[in-house]
Amino acid sequence: MKHSILFMTASCLVLLGACVRDDLSWKEQLDAQQKQLDEQKKQQEADALRLAELQKTLDGLKKSDTPFSFVLALPPADTVSKGLDFTSTLRVNPSGLAFTKDMIALDYIAGKQFYRVEPNATKASYIKNSQYFSLKNFEADKNDGGQVLDGQYLVTLTTKAEEAVWDDSRLAFVGAYVDKEGKNQLVSSDPFNMVMMPLPSEGLSPWIYPHASFLIEEKKKDDKGQVTINERFGAVYLPLDGVLFKTKDDTDGRFYTSENLKDVEFVPDEGCEAAVKVDFDLKKRYVYFEPDTTANLAWRAFQDSTGVKRQEVKGSVILKDRWGAYSSYHVTMYWYNTYVFPINIEATVDEIKAGIPMNLTEEVRKLGLDYDVMKDCRRVASFPVHHLFNDLTFEPFDNNKPEEGELILYAPAVPGDKFQTEELRTVTINASEVDALFSPLTVSFKVVINLTIK
């Protein structure tokens, strides 16, 4: 009897579990059916809206008295940048039919728009959702000899949008004729896909740390452990970070990167005498500039100068995309002629015993170490390593403000004694959005503090 009760209990649990699963299954099926109905309703509403818009377009067209058809002899290119025109070759049959621009229109069949997501934001920013393609010109096509090709036309389309948008659309050419019964009959070409790309200035998010040392010492160790010191020109880097574009409902997205570019140029401002070389790695998504000293008197004079000097270079970076559009950024860059910055201090025995307050902010800024500019950059600044060097050290009051501190001597001092401490300062820039290991040194110098006891 006991075994029977246990068996019955187990059976009931199995049946209960089956019922629960069945309930869940029915709920899932109902949810799926409702979702399908909602999508169908949404599509029906979109189709009704499209037909209404198409009817408005056809009402404004001149109708042919003769039946005709369209043939896309040469479809348009499938991708174009915003603001550019593009062409298509269209045949109208029969070829003898007189056809004019007011007899043809562009039909927006379907599409999806992606709007720029601003950096540090999660939502796409947009102004409106509109049709960004329009018919600009319609003229008879000609052969190489300038003769009109009967029944063949060159159609020029244009793109326009105020907002930063990436548009994927399906389009067709449409027209209409009046049949024998006096009814309007729609004529449509085969549909074609068109993508309107944002401009480089809209699809990229560039930034710059504008400072660089003119010459940078780099230590390299070979397989035998021997260290060699090489000098190279310091470079200023312009990372071209990609930008995400998303639909209004956040269900789909596109990502624009510098691989959509074809070329990068630099045009110096008028009067800028110091030439720079510009190079770029579009796969790693950055541009960089370094001094071009070849037969350049400005850089030679700068290299031979004494004291702390700064060479300013101003100009426009022109980004050209693969479809013929371009955008430009104006940049200002600086190179510094020395990587040793001496600070000479005189102090009495009593002053140095108490510690001498110092603020090195302006001094290190003169050589390109600018913390305010760094806030919006992927960079690593080497904060000074405070250690005893000949019993003299500079110690900050707050590690978050390494330039404000005091000079302290940990040794007996008498008038005439001299002490020295030095700190290496560097800035490396992570110029590549896709390569975290690529962080070249761009600023390098030493702060040398010379103390004389008076």
Image (cartoon, rainbow, N blue to C red):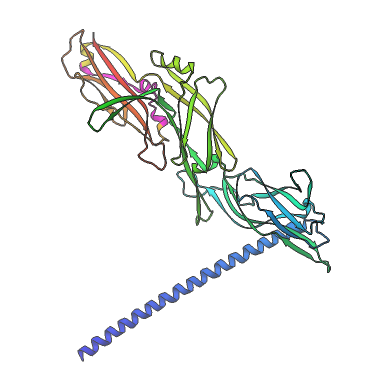
Query: In the image, 319: left or right of 444?
Result: right
Q: Decide if residue 413 is on the left or right side of residue 148.
A: left
Is residue 284 located in the magenta-colored stretch of the structure? no
Does the magenta portion include 372? Answer: yes
Question: Which of the image's four quarters has the N terminus?
Answer: bottom left
Question: Split into 4 quadrants, where in the image is the C terminus?
Answer: top left
- Depth check: 231 or 451 in front? 231
Residue beneath the point at 37% across and 37% down:
438
Q: Position of residue 414 (x, y in %)?
A: 18, 9
The residue furthest bottom is 1
Point out the residue furthest to the left here.
412
Taking 44 as reference, is 176 left or right?
right
Q: Residue at x 50, y 41 (%)?
A: 204
Eyeballing the image, is 73 above or below 352? below
User: Where is residue 391 shown, x and y percent of the image?
Assistant: 19, 19
Instruction: Place residue 50 in its image quadrant.
Output: bottom right
Indicate the quadrant where residue 71 lies. Answer: bottom right
Q: Position of residue 253 (x, y in %)?
A: 50, 53
Identify the residue shown where x is 60% and y is 65%.
Answer: 43
**Residue that appears at 74% across and 61% down:** 187
Looking at the image, residue 18 lies above or below residue 452: below
Q: Which residues are magenta?
A: 353-373
Q: Does residue 113 appear anywhere in the picture?
A: yes
Give the tally of numbered discs.
0
The picture places residue 95, in percent across and down from the top left corner, at 79, 56
**Which of 346/133 is in front?**
133
* Observer able to see residue 405: no
